[in-house]
Structure formats: structure tokens, C-alpha cells
Amino acid sequence: MILKTFSDDQSNPSELSTHILLVDDEYDLLRALSATLTRAGWQVTTASDGQQALHVFRRISPNLIILDLMLPVLDGWEVCREVRKTSDVPIIMLTARDDSVDKILGLELGADDYVTKPFDSRELIARIRAILRRANRTYTGTTLRLADIEINLESQTVSRDGKQTVLTPTEFDLLVHLARHPGRVFSREDLLEQVWGYDFPGDLRTVDVHVRRLRLKVEQDPAHPTLIRTRFGVGYVLVP
């Protein structure tokens, strides 16, 4: 089942141009949430299984994906894995189980955030808006250098020893934020507010997983990081 809906609110053209792919196999939730997101000002296309979701994703190139984990045909983890092979589009995962393993696996595969069912639609909308703001973030300046790492702010790319390292937008934002404040320790709450843009409580494990993914890409020895260090009981600090 594919539904495509458009907002009739013309007051915010920038939001109206945003296309969200909503994937869930619960018909009532799909229709209700699609209507809610449309009223919020976004264009919404839906899919009800994983295979259909990939087909629609390749056809419409959405600006954001809201992806249920428990899907028929292909589950949400597999969909996320396939999307990340070709795209860094923001992904919010939906899960009906309050299982930390499910959530962490989704983040490890490249999801930007997750929401546990049942959820308040106002919170989901706030998370969507925060993620879209980050996806459209621009930087002033040209280059930041950290040992053998070069961060090109204009192109939003990162190189280590002259070889480009592919980061997701969230990983890039996290690295830039830490790099612009070398030696400063940030708590996880600080990072959720200042990098993720959340002015509401978020799951601190989101920060931990993104730091771990970032270390895999920028540290010489991710198991013994020397650049992005943990201050136990406090948070993270970049040591140039």
C-alpha cells in the first residue's frame, strides 16, 4: 500500500518542499501519522513493507525516512542497511519494543534517532524538525585540522592522511562541534542539545553510539581512542 499526501498549508514553503517517507505495516497508525505529518506542513509518501519502502525510496529520494523496525518482507534493519549503502538521508526508527538492543542496532546501522511506540506525535514532530535543521545546516569558515585529519567545512567532508572518510551528517556535525571546542568536556545532555538540537529529553545512548561510530572512522585505533576521549561520569572531549 502506497499513500501520497500533500499539505494544504501554504504558509511555510520550505517545509512543504520536504518529502517524508513513512514506513509502517500498521494501517491505522500509517494513516493517522501520515495525516498528522501532512498537517504539520510536509509532503508524505507511505509504504507498508520493507521491500516496498526501498522501491519508493529509490523513486522519490525523500528528505527524511520514518522507519518501523518490525516490517514484513524486509525488516527495518535491513531497509536501513540498504539505504545507507547509497544515501545519508536522515532516518528515525520506530520500535514497539523498549529493547535497548533493538535501538542500539538501529543506530549502529546508521539511523539518526528512534522513537518507541506509543509516542506523542508532538515529540516526533519536534524530533523531525530538529533533524531537518541539522540536515540543512551550513558552516562558515574553510578548514579545521586535527593531527592527520582535515575537516573541510565548505564541502562538509573529512580526510585522514589525505584519504576521504565518509561521515553521516550527524557524525560530521558531532566532529565539527568537538573540534571547534578542543579540550572542553561535553556531557551527553550538552551534545543532544547543541548537536542534535533537542530542547527536550533524549536517550543518551544515541550520543554514545554516534561517538562510537565516529571513532571507527577517525581514530587510528578505535579501541584505544586518542582523539575523542571519554571522561567517565562526565562525557566526551576532543584532544587534538
Image (spheres, helix red, strand yellow):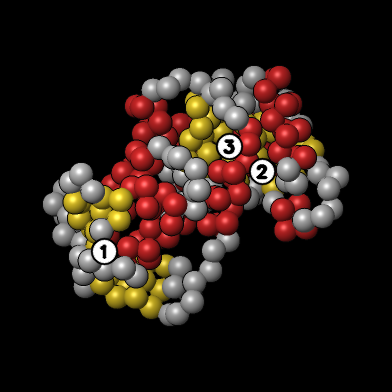
Q: Position of residue 173 (x, y in %)?
A: 42, 60
* Amino acid bearing label 2: Ile
Point out residue 232 in the picture as x, y percentages from the top left corner: 18, 46
Q: CA distance from mark 2 to mark 1?
A: 36 Å
State how far apart marks 2 and 3 are (Cα): 16 Å
Tell me what residue is drawn at x 43 percent, y 80 percent: 142
Which residue has dot 2 on it? 20
Q: Depth check: 177 or 65 in front?
A: 177
Write down the quadrant of residue 59 in the picture: top right
Residue type for callout 1: Arg
Please give left or right for residue 117 compared with residue 101 in the image.
Answer: right
Viewer-proximal residue among 159 and 52: 159
- For image coordinates 50% across by 48% down, the residue present is 199
For label 3, the SS is helix
Disc 3 target residue: 123
**Residue at the outermost bottom position:** 142
Q: Quadrant of residue 66?
A: top right
Q: Is tag 2's residue or tag 3's residue first in the polypeptide sequence?
A: 2
Image location of residue 16, percent across then percent down: 76, 52
